[in-house]
Image (tube, helix red, strand yellow):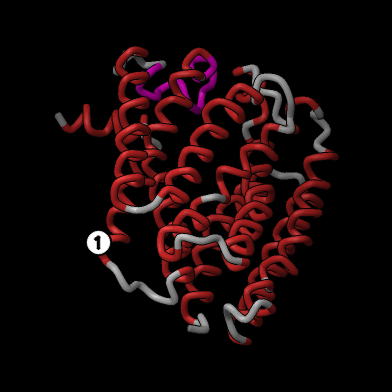
Amino acid sequence: MLETISAYLTLSKARIVLLVTISTVIGFFLGGNGIHSIPLLMFTIVGIALVTAGGAALNQYLERDADAKMHRTQDRPLPSEFISPSQALKYGINMVLVGLAVLIWKVNLLVSFLALLSAFLYVLVYTPLKKYTWWNTFIGAIPGAIPPMIGWAAASNDLEIGAWVLFAIIFVWQFPHFYPLAWMFREDYARGGFKMLPVIEPDGKSTFRQIIWYSILLIPVSTLPTFIEMAGQTYLFGAVILSVAFLGLGILFVKTKTFANADKLFKASLVYLPLLFILIVFDFKI
């Protein structure tokens, strides 16, 4: 029983579901000037969690053959044959449909549309593009940045400038977050037939440029909440410190080109975003 639960959590990419849920809650809090309806928040969380889990399952269904060739993913439920392709397909479709039904019934149509758009881009655009072009990362960053907009729309039934600022921050953050991982596992991605930037350009020059460019861009973008009067000076100071430190780790990796520093940058990216969220909630202007 526990093994089956663990397999379905892996199929659902539980860590990604958690990150999406946190981003959604942040958007809900900011879009609603605080949390004024716990039931509405709960229905939003349940709906988006189900849609995200279903999308993750469908992604693994489509990539099951590639996953079997990659060391990093060969133990996933589908390549290891713990879950059959037909089971994964049914699970993924049902989770998406039930999640959308919850959002339509208990939240609003704007949220439902955003959730459907995110799932569509992730499963039917980003996933197949990984086999054809390195631009898949750019496309994949779009659904990755939609969750806070979903939370905002759930709380306000609108998409004001603050929602777009949150989208921009997470969109830009994803490049220095993902590219170190893609560089570390470039040989594995090549085995799977994925056209990631470090795979099609093994010397890494374009990958390193992308990391630096987006890390630099993240500095002004991360300060936007203060300039639209969504957050105060404490947030501004903290955002600049975090973003400059993050850029410093990116420069260190690009200079040394070592696995250890790529891993440091990737792990730092996992700390950067939650800290930024904490700062914006702490210094939020209601």
Q: Residue furthest bottom?
A: 233
- 40 or 240, nearer to the observer: 40
Question: In the rendered structure, which amino acid carries the disc numbered 1?
Answer: Pro
Q: Residue furthest left?
A: 1
Q: Quick check: is 74 in the magenta stretch?
A: yes
- 182 or 22, nearer to the observer: 22
Q: Which residue is mark 1?
A: 39
Query: Which residue lies at the image location 83% right of the left edge and 39% below the top edge?
Result: 206
Query: How many tags in the picture?
Result: 1
Residue 188 lies, with reference to residue 237, above or below; the image says: above
Q: Judge left or right: residue 129 versus residue 127.
A: right
Location of residue 197 (image quadrant):
top right
- Dominant secondary-structure state across the stretch colored magenta: loop
The boundaries of the magenta stretch are 66-78
Residue 37 lies, with reference to residue 140, above or below; the image says: below
Query: Which residue lies at the image location 75% right of the left edge and 69% below the top edge?
Result: 220
Location of residue 218 (image quadrant):
bottom right
Query: Which residue lies at the image location 52% right of the left edge and 40% below the top edge?
Result: 118
Residue 251 lies, with reference to residue 12, above or below; the image says: below
Q: Judge left or right: residue 211 versus residue 168.
A: right
- 102 or 62, nearer to the observer: 102
Q: Residues within 10 Å of mark 1 (few under 14, many from 20)?
A: few
- x, y percentage for residue 28? 42, 64
- x, y percentage for residue 119? 49, 35
User: Quadrant of the image for the N terminus?
Assistant: top left
- x, y percentage for residue 43? 29, 53
Query: Which residue lies at the image location 53% right of the left edge and 39% below the top edge?
Result: 117
Q: Quick check: is 129 in the magenta stretch?
A: no
- x, y percentage for residue 229? 62, 81
Q: Is disc 1 placed on a helix, strand or loop?
A: helix
